[in-house]
Amino acid sequence: MNGIFERLKHIKIFRAVIYAIVGAITYPGLVLINKLKIEGTEHLEKLPRKNVLFVSNHQTYFADVITFIHIFCAVKWRQRNKLGIPFYLLNPFTSVYFVAAEETMNGSFISRIFKLGGALTVKRTWRAEGKEVRRGLDPSDTRKISKALDNNWIITFPQGTTKPFAPGRKGTAYIIKNSQPIVVPVVINGFWRAFTKRGLTFKKKGSLLSIRFKEPMVIDYTKPIDEILEQVMDAIEQSKKFMLKGKHHVMTILDK
């Protein structure tokens, strides 16, 4: 049965149906119940349909990715920095996959359905005595992602966790170095405030959700993996210098 589902998620018509259903359910929560601010979609308009890697910070397990897919579909229908009326769900953009932890995508009925929409599941962590422990690079996972890049866009979250300013994982830099994709950094905010981390239940209605697409990165693929990873973390504003800026901003507000 798992083999059948695995084959189904690589069929674009099947993924289009999943996107239409999930999109119709989630659209009100993104646009009507909350407020969605989108910037930088002009950087997406001329991208090729393959070998493009979107790297982003991460705040919820599902709402972030679902919003990305909404935006990609809207851009396909020539919308810029807005979703508009979701006619785009009639013919969604399906040349996209997203990287997700296997344990997350198998955690609930909803996540299993969304998994069919194009999840590239990876074994990112294991837990010992209630604590998350980082595992080494799994070559089979990186091969899976690299192969998908051959004909698609990929969304990945280098930190592999919703914890802000967590260190990035070298697997993303390894894929960048070896596949040499166009890398588009994305900075998101507000999702942690609006939605619960593990689902699409509302925490605070009327929240501002923001997604900002930056220009594709200029990367020297000959650089060491550590340097590429550092460049990526700077681009998604999750490096140490941005953490220090955030702390300084909070202290400034408190001083006032």
Image: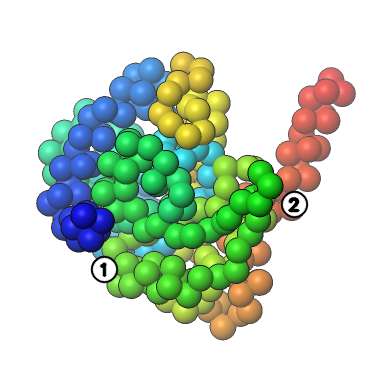
Please tell me how crowded label 1 is: few (under 14), some (14-19), or many (20+) other residues with Cα within 10 Å: some
Number of labelled discs?
2
Give, as a three-letter code, the residue at label 1: Asn
Residue 241 circle label = 2
| Residue 182 in sight in this render | no
Give the amino acid at mark 2: Lys
The x and y percentages for residue 228 are 60, 70
Residue in the foreground of this view, choosing between 155 and 99: 99
Which residue does the numbered mark 1 point to in the structure image? 151
Q: Sequence order check: which comes first, mark 1 or mark 2?
A: 1
Which residue: 13% across, 38% down? 90
Res 5 label: none
In the image, 208 versus 111, the foreground residue is 111
Q: CA distance from mark 1 to mark 2?
A: 35 Å
Image coords of residue 44 (percent x, y): 35, 54
The residue sitting at 57% across, 42% down in the picture is 162
Its colouring scheme is: rainbow
Q: Is residue 137 above or below residue 103?
A: below
Residue in view at x 51 percent, y 53 percent: 157
The image shows residue 127 at horizontal and vertical percentages of: 61, 51
Judging from the image, what secondary structure is the residue with disc 1 in? loop
